[in-house]
Image (spheres, coloured by chain):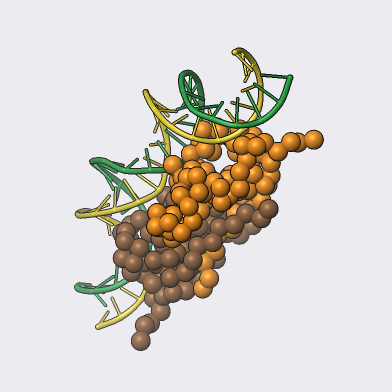
Chain colours: A brown, B orange, C green, D yellow
Amino acid sequence: MKTRNKNLITLEEFKEKNYGKRGTKERDELEAGYENFKIGALIYNARIEKGMTQEQLAEKVGTTKSYISKIENNIKEARISTLQKIIELGFGDTLEVSVKL
Amino acid sequence: MKTRNKNLITLEEFKEKNYGKRGTKERDELEAGYENFKIGALIYNARIEKGMTQEQLAEKVGTTKSYISKIENNIKEARISTLQKIIELGFGDTLEVSVKL
DNA sequence: ATAAAAGTTTCTCTAAAGTGAAACACAAGG
DNA sequence: CCTTGTGTTTCACTTTAGAGAAACTTTTAT
């Protein structure tokens, strides 16, 4: 039986820790900014939902836990194919990118 | 009245030109591969639908037509924020990335 | 209190994105 | 023919992703 790691906090807690409280100027500017802010939270959120550690995710994707950490904290910004690897190999899901015409 | 440039071909013509006929092994492998193959076609397709030239798109995005060409032909693979710039600044649309949980 | 597990940060290296400009190819139209 | 518009390719350069490992911090469990 997998006991839930207390390290694992909610997405809001994660964002608050890393980017400040909701409603603050700094946080709002980040939220309104480019996708990389959202991508880190997206991956973190998905990983937690799947009950995986960074190391487990890294192994599935074929990278290291340090890289996963950097992506989740938006220290590095992934390429599209890297994001796809994480989503497909890591989470067994499909990346979807769309433009409405 | 904007006359449609005869340079502008269909997406299938574009793919056939760059990646070979549908059903060939080479083309199938590309279609099954990572997103970058699709991203080039996605951007090309959206640009044509909007009736824009590479130079017009480049100006909106804040880059050069040579870069747009490379992205469309998958010579370079964009980062997520770059793709977002193209979609938002270039096409006035929103990039959506999702993972089902 | 200590050990183990999970996550972060730092370091070095290389492959590739991103930029800018210029030259080139090529079709359409005067 | 020549010119113009559009797209491609090349070159040189700077920045950053991506990798790998190691040290470090923080959290959780014993």
Question: In the visual, does A4 lie left or right of C11?
Answer: right
Q: Residue furthest bottom?
A: A1
**Residue A50 in view (yes/no):** yes
Quarter of the image that includes the N terminus of chain B: top right
Q: What is the x, y in percent for residue A97?
A: 55, 57
**Number of marks present in the image shown:** 0
Q: What is the x, y in percent for residue B57?
A: 62, 38
B31, above or below A9, in the image = above
**Front residue (pair A89, B35):** B35
**Front residue (pair A82, A42):** A82
Q: What is the x, y in percent for residue A2?
A: 36, 83
Residue at 46% in and 59% down: B23
Q: What is the x, y in percent for residue A41?
A: 50, 61
Q: Residue furthest right?
A: B1
Residue at 68% in and 53% down: A101
**Residue B59 in view (yes/no):** no
Residue at 38% in and 82% down: A3
Residue at 75% in and 36% down: B2
**Front residue (pair B69, B26):** B26
Question: In the visual, does B54 lie left or right of A91?
Answer: right
Question: In the visual, does D12 lie left or right of C23?
Answer: left
Question: In the visual, does A65 lie left or right of B47?
Answer: left
C12, above or below D13, in the image = below
